Amino acid sequence: MSVVREQGGKSATSALWLRHCPQQPRAAIITLHGGRAEGYQTSQPWHLAALRMRPILRAAASAMPLDELVLAHVRYRHRGWNQDDPLNDTYRALGELQQITGPVLTVLVGHSMGGRAALRAASHPEVDGVLALAPWLPPNEPATQLSGKRTVVVHGERDRVTSPHDSADYIKRARTAGARAGIILIRNGDHAMLRRSRLWHRTVTPLVTDLLRPDEQPSGLAAACYAATAPLML
């Protein structure tokens, strides 16, 4: 196992922060944390939004043997969305991943602003699937880039920061665009994924497992949310 931490091995200008990189990976999971609508302050790994994604990445990592799996975060230059800054950082991170590993099956897992960036970055040819957690999805957010890909949104029922209704509308548009897409609501769940956190984490693992198997038929929780005509409630 090769682990690169914040002060090791990577340039400060790198957009990809590797947490685990085996010699011959078959797949990669990259997380994208939340942020702000605007803000040019430097994004740091000790900010709460970034720290919240660490247990999410651990839950996602259970989907495949570690000796086959790259685990990484996107390192943002700025804390705000600004002019698509996190999206551009994600594209840079995907390019760096290709340079390190060559083509590998890649799943993005993003929260809030990071969920928006992950869904947008599905336009990148290396992205096979997206799990968006409580994503920030303004009206008219594009969904056509998800055509032919698997996408799941998980949103807290009582989220007061981003809208579960906007997420449900987005999934409808993604399905119309040709995505295999579904939405799950966490009953009484909040935006920070702290209320019922164990359920959030338990939900991440099977969904990422499905996203890492794009050539197989969906099963379990993923199949249920893809088939549901209304948001699936947990």
Image (spheres, rainbow, N blue to C red):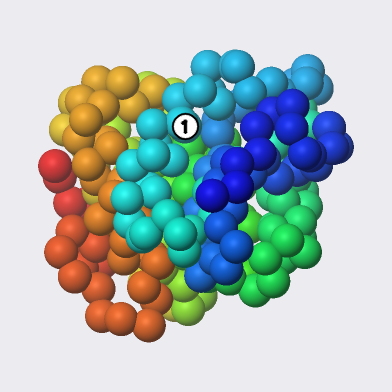
Crowding at label 1, few (<14), some or many (≥20) Cα neighbours within 10 Å?
many
Residue 109 shows in this picture: yes
Vertical order, 224 against 158 (above or below): below
Vertical order, 13 against 167 (above or below): above
State which quadrant residue 144 falls in: bottom right
Q: Residue at x 51, y 23 (%)?
A: 51
Vertical order, 120 against 126 (above or below): above
Report how many numbered discs are placed on residues in the image.
Answer: 1
Q: Residue at x 57, y 68 (%)?
A: 24
Residue marked by disc 1:
53
Residue 168 shows in this picture: no
Please provide percent x and percent y for residue 16.
70, 45
Q: Residue at x 31, y 65 (%)?
A: 210
Image check: 186 left or right of 97?
left
Image check: 209 left or right of 35?
left
Kind of residue at badge 1: Met
